[in-house]
Image: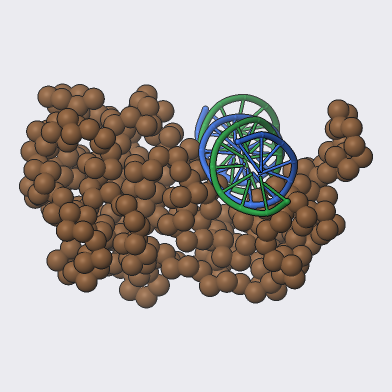
Chain colours: A brown, B green, C blue
Amino acid sequence: MSTLSKSASSSSEEDAELRRGPWTLEEDTLLIHYIASHGEGRWNLLAKCSGLRRTGKSCRLRWLNYLKPDVKRGNLTPQEQLLILELHSKWGNRWSKIAQHLPGRTDNEIKNYWRTRVQKQARHLKIDSNSRAFQDVIRCVWMPRLLQKIEGSSSTSSTTSQVSIIPQSLNHADSQQHSAAAPPPVVAQAPVQGPLSINETINNLEHNEKNSSSENCTSPSICSSESMNISQISQIPDYPTSPFQAMSNSDDYSTLLKGYYNVDNSNYEMETFNLASMSAPQGDFENPVGDCPMVESNWVDSDLADSLWNMDELWQFWKLQEGAPRLF
DNA sequence: AAGGGTATCAACCGCTCGTAT
DNA sequence: AATACGAGCGGTTGATACCCT
């Protein structure tokens, strides 16, 4: 539907000429070439001078969310999903801020992921996606599952995937960048995709245009399996020291959690949120995730893993939560 | 095969913030 | 200090692909 928007209410001819809706290949090419020779920014000027009949805003959005060479396409990796869950628990709907820590991913993409995948689960459970209850579900069900997926992929693919699962004790150098109370979480991170040349970008575009109806990811150079760069994650300035901290604004809640999970929060602070502890066998008393009333984990291999939880298991978790002495 | 429902994602909109004048 | 303007952000919408009956 490439529409020339001729608004009846528009007073100026210029407004009437403005295009809206999906971008065409010609428009994309025009924008790419203009930016290649003039650089980014001054979007309104760009819109006027480039010959595009688009608003500056529209040009900016198209460039940042789609055309920019380092934009990564394709499904979010488990590492990226895990990071989104973690960062959202800390920052809420600060999509652009979260996106800064996922190289190549746009705020729009992360926002869409949250709304379509995460909030959907909350709706199924009939709970508020911003509630602590739901964050418990994320922490006790979703995150461990992602971690197991990460572990699984790291043990099976040694070449393309650089997912690292490093015990805190082995990650000393990295953790020294942080205060003792706030060692970094050890999560995998994707390296930034090397910038594509203009020609490569255009080639990708043309390739995408041809294949757009058949698959999500059409550019091997963009969709290549990638992992996360631990040092980047560790540099997140005010990363939560634990899921407890990330979720809780009140000491009361920490106290309740201690009681419920039979976990010493201060101990947890020392142990921190890292793959080694989170994926440890259940029963490890220093592992709050392991102490969650987690269901048996045949769900790890479920085909639902990429987007949906096993609702039966969620309900089981939910019932356990409701039977607990405290909580929400 | 057709129709309806659902999921996904690109794009738009309105608002806020920062900066220049 | 006030104002204007551009850039950016988060929320929402609409098109379309996909799935199920």
* A163 sits left or right of A55 in the view: left
Q: Nearer the viewer, residue A297 or A150?
A: A150
User: Residue A327: x percent and y percent?
Assistant: 19, 27
Residue at position x 14%, y 49% from top? Answer: A268
Against A143, residue A172 (above or below) is below
Against A118, residue A276 (above or below) is below
Q: If the image is split into quadrants, where does the N terminus of chain A sit?
A: top right
Q: Nearer the viewer, residue A118 or A238?
A: A238
- Could you tell me if residue A83 is visible in this image? yes
- Could you tell me if residue A25 is visible in this image? no
Q: If the image is split into quadrants, where does the C terminus of chain A sit?
A: top left
Quadrant hosting residue A246: top left
Residue at position x 41%, y 28% from top? Answer: A123
User: Residue A177: x percent and y percent?
Assistant: 25, 65
User: Residue A61: x percent and y percent?
Assistant: 65, 50
* B15 sits left or right of A9 in the view: left
Residue at position x 56%, y 61% from top? Answer: A71
Residue at position x 51%, y 56% from top? Answer: A105
* A136 sits left or right of A235 in the view: left
Quadrant hosting residue A6: top right
Quadrant hosting residue A5: top right
Q: Nearer the viewer, residue A11 or A305?
A: A11
Q: Nearer the viewer, residue A73 or A234?
A: A234
Against A227, residue A91 (above or below) is above
